[in-house]
Image (cartoon, rainbow, N blue to C red):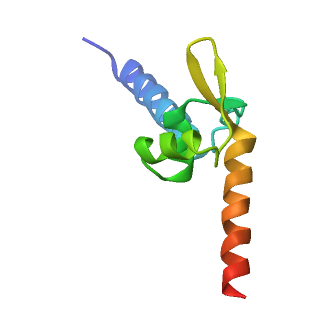
Amino acid sequence: MATADEITELAATLAKLARTLAEQETRPTQSAPPSFPPERVMLTVEEAAERLGIGRTLMFKLLRTGQIESVRIGRLRRVPASAIQDYAARLVASASATAA
């Protein structure tokens, strides 16, 4: 059986541990900022459609009619990210011109 002195010492150790844990919970953690993958230069048709908020079928129609530029890499069809931005800018300019 533990003596009174041992129990007192154990209680003091447990109290110290509780204070240490409480301090760690209240301290803000300094973690590294989240790292995002680098912006991709070439997008799949599905990714390009998602960026525009349109469906895959409409995206293929825009590619087929040449309204959005795309390139073939082997058997793959890729859309330059800049082509999405250019298309959106043309849409905004067109809407502004017809509204004025």
Q: Residue furthest bottom?
A: 100
Residue 74, image x and y in percent?
62, 11
Residue at the image point whose x is 43% and y is 29% from the top: 14
Residue 47, image x and y in percent?
53, 36
Locate residue 9 relative to residue 80 in the image: left or right.
left
> Which residue is nearer to you in this view: 5 or 33?
33
Q: Residue furthest left?
A: 1
Query: How many numbered markers are drawn?
Result: 0
Residue at the image point whose x is 73% and y is 79% from the top: 97
Residue at the image point whose x is 74% and y is 70% from the top: 93
* Quadrant that contains the C terminus: bottom right
Locate residue 97 relative to residue 4 in the image: left or right.
right
Picture quadrant where residue 92 is located: bottom right
Picture quadrant where residue 42 is located: top right
Residue 18, image x and y in percent?
46, 35
Q: Can residue 23 be seen from the camera position used here?
A: no
> Which residue is nearer to you in this view: 29 or 79?
79
Q: Can residue 67 be seen from the camera position used here?
A: yes
Image position of 17 with respect to 75: above or below: below
Residue at the image point whose x is 58% and y is 45% from the top: 65
Locate residue 54 relative to residue 69 in the image: left or right.
left
Residue 60, image x and y in percent?
49, 39
* Quadrant that contains the N terminus: top left
Image position of 92 with respect to 21: above or below: below
Image position of 58 with respect to 46: above or below: below
